[in-house]
Each structure stands twice: as structure tokens, then as C-alpha cells.
Amino acid sequence: MRAVRFHEYGGTDVLRVDDIERPTPGPEEVLLEVEAAAVNPVDTYFRIGDYEPGELPWIPGSDCAGTVAATGERVATVTEGDRAFATGLGNWLQGTCAEYVTVPESHLARLPDGVSAEAGAAVALVGVTAWQTLVDACSLEPAERALIHGGSGGVGHVAVQLAAANGAQVTTTASPAYHNQLADLGADD
């Protein structure tokens, strides 16, 4: 299979396409045939060496979406042929910029019908980040007020929608050019 990898730290010139062996899923892993992979700022930090991934060469990429090609014997949430999206890769696990990737079952979910692979890959990390902030860390309850700085950014626009869907009063900061869009997403102020 083909995979984008870096063998040393540096600029984009260290990225290259390599032919490597297709991975095999472990007992609690899923082999996903990648249809779309997202690029996030954290991928740059790993590539330039600000964060150290596992042993080089390394496949970057945190998020992807595609079709389940195989599952480990203990996987229960998806089966071969299911569409799924994943996040949390590319740091201590090889990343998503490849034709196939092994994903721990805990790092993926079924991709809903009608959602494109591109949309699934794009929302994975920002969606988890917004959820962890609003629900896990802040325990946001309906009718509470949520202040979301940078509502027009990747995490921000998902956080606005999650908070509004939860019944919160949403105040956000953003450039005036984004005010109407954020109101459409559920921002009150």
C-alpha cells in the first residue's frame, strides 16, 4: 500500500510517498480502508519535531474516514463493509495518510448514512475536542450560558452547534464576517 511518511523532522519537503506493507489489525483493532484523511495543525508539530511521535519513519494524520476492511476477533461495534470514521491517530499510533490504517476500536465510530467520508474525517478531532470541553470538562447543562471563543474556527463552530443543541445560551467571539454564519449554527450572541 502507499503511505505518506517522514523519515526525519523538517518542512514539507521531508514528506514522501512510500510503498509499505498493509497493516494487520490486532484483536481490538479495525483495518480501515481510508477514503479521506484530514490534516490538522498537530500533524505539523509532529512533522517538524515539536512533538515526538513513535519511531521514524512516521505516517502523519490524526483523522480519517473510510470502509472497514477487516476486524480483530474482539471487535464488536463494526463489521467488514461498514463505513466508519476515526480520530486520535498519528501521535503514538501511525497516522491516517495511507491507503489503510489500523485503528483501536475505541478510536472509531460508524459514519452515519448521508455523511461523506470527507465530512467524517474533517469533524472527527474537532468534534471530540468540542465534546470533551463542553460535556466532559464543563458538564454543560441546558439553559446554562456557554462562552465559546473563536466560534468560527474548527473546534469553535462544532462547539457552537453542540452547545445550542444541548439547550445552552451560546455567546461566541468571532470576526464580524462570521456573525451571520454563527447565528445560523445556533449562537445567541
Image (tube, helix red, strand yellow):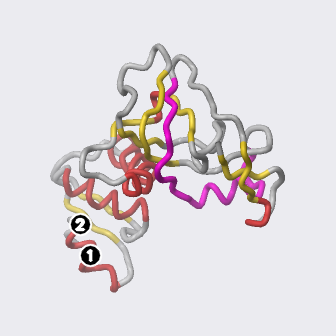
Which label is found at residue 27? none
The location of residue 162, given as percent across then percent down, is: 27, 53
Q: Does the magenta stretch include residue 43?
A: yes
Q: Is residue 175 magenta?
A: no
The location of residue 36, given as percent across then percent down, is: 47, 53
| Quarter of the image with the C terminus in it | bottom left
Q: Which of 187 and 14 is in front in this view?
A: 14
The location of residue 64, given as percent across then percent down, is: 48, 48
Residue stretch in magenta? 29-52
Can you identify the residue that label 1 sits on?
181
The location of residue 114, given as percent across then percent down, is: 24, 51
Which label is found at residue 185? 2
Check disc 1 and give the amino acid type. Answer: Gln
Quadrant of residue 24 within the rendered picture: top right
| Quarter of the image with the N terminus in it | top right
Check disc 2 and give the amino acid type. Answer: Leu
Q: Residue at x 51, y 53 (%)?
A: 37
Q: Residue at x 43, y 34 (%)?
A: 68
Rendered view: 44 above or below 63 = below
